Amino acid sequence: MADEVTLRSTPARPFLAATTTPQVAYLLVELQPAPVIANVRMPVNVCFVLDRSGSMKGNKIDRVRLATSMALDRLDERDVFSVVIFDHRTEVLIPSQPVQAPEELKNIIHRIRDAGGTKIAPAVDRALKEIGKDTRGKICRLVLLTDGQTEHEQECLLRADDAGQASIPITALGVGKDWNEDLLIEMANRSGGTADFIDRPEKIVDFFQHTVQRAQAAVVQNTMLTMRLMQGIAPRAVWQVIPLINNLGYQPISERDVSVQLGELEYGQGQALLMEFLVEPRSVGQYRVGQVEVTYDIPALGLSHQKVRQDMLLTFTTDSAQLRQVHAPVMNIVEKVSAFNLQTRALQDLQVGDVGSATRKLKSAVTRLLSQGETELAEAMQQEVANLEKDGQLSSEGQKTIKFGTRKTVRLSDLDIP
């Protein structure tokens, strides 16, 4: 019985206008592992790939040692652990092994010292080999942390391709302001993982712990969403909004059916998607415009290809009072996605040298963020607008704040829909 995942869909507007012209409709779809699997935990195979170059000296390397040791505390004998360290050389500090003697492993971790330059690709390659020693029945993660630029970036991308083919997502973390965020983002994307910005070394501990917790909670696997749409309903975009804002795209599977690969669902968080449709004119009434179907596996329970479905309904009216009604939380999420889209397009404008267009888009994004209560992020973006107007470019730290900050503006509390 497929009751391990709950499915809820909420339109941004409960009523659409019965007009003679097409219109855009938004639907929030939430997928959440149910309490019935609250105590299910997947064994984890995690390798920490740690930059120990000279620029990591001091507080950074101290925090890396502490963070890796504290992440180890969250693992037990069911889990597999390894550590690869790198500067311009690569060293397997802790070969892949079950977590059976954590204090001995911590003693090894505490011996990490800073030295040398930065060369990421060989370290990732070696980490993939360590993880590959024991992947059966485990959630695999490669956690990469660096604070600097690396040589041979194309090799890094090829190793990220290898990780993706082996189903080993890379969590790519940059600390400080002197690393290439575009490289880490692309490595994460190619491997099916995530990238993030750590602005202060003190936060490394939380990032490492969160990564391990998320891996252990990823009990629902191989999740795929299929939309079966009626005539006159066309998909325009599918945005992931929880855990991060991301344009997922979709894959046509027939004339009116499309699929979206979602991967893992984590207990306690799940995923939320904002779907954008173009709807052809309808007369007054309620219509079934399609169906959402989600298939998934739960290997820890021996379950595969489980399904949960829900019809998509839209109501059309000419009543002006009804047309003014909105689901405020969903509309707020629409605005947050819009702000993210604006900053993405602004950065694209900058890449081709169109500073004026980039400035206008960032100003519009600032306005939207302020209206959503994202004051800190809006202020950081406003400072970058000033930098653009003065110098024609963004600061390194500000660019990272914009790229990563706007992806995290949707939170679980935003999904409290009455």
Image (cartoon, rainbow, N blue to C red):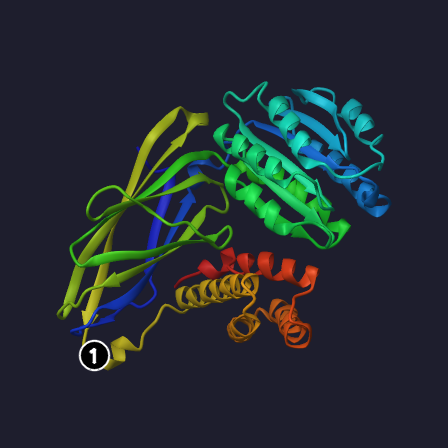
Percent of width and height locating residue 323: 27, 76
Vertical comparison of 413 with 190: above or below: below
Residue most extreme to the bottom: 320
Look at 77% across and 50% down and name the residue there.
Answer: 202
Q: Is 239 situated left or right of 161 in this image?
A: left
Front position in the image: 270 or 115: 115
Percent of width and height locating residue 352: 54, 63
Residue most extreme to the left: 283
Front position in the image: 190 or 265: 190
Residue 402 in view, yes or no? yes
Percent of width and height locating residue 188: 56, 42
Look at 53% across and 25% down and name the residue there.
Answer: 138
Front position in the image: 160 or 248: 160
Occupied quadrant, residue 118: top right
Percent of width and height locating residue 173: 65, 45
Vertical comparison of 364 with 150: above or below: below
Q: Is 381 situated left or right of 177 in this image?
A: left
* Quadrant in the picture for the N terminus: top left
Look at 64% across and 31% down and name the residue there.
Answer: 124
Residue 210 in view, yes or no? no
Element under disc 1: loop
What residue would you read off at disc 1?
Answer: 319
Front position in the image: 344 or 194: 344
Residue most extreme to the front: 353
Crowding near the residue tagged with mark 1, few <14, some 14–19, many ≥20 C-alpha atoms within 10 Å: few
Q: Is 97 situated left or right of 263 in this image?
A: right
Residue type, numbered disc 1: Asp
Mark count: 1
* Quadrant in the picture for the C terminus: bottom left
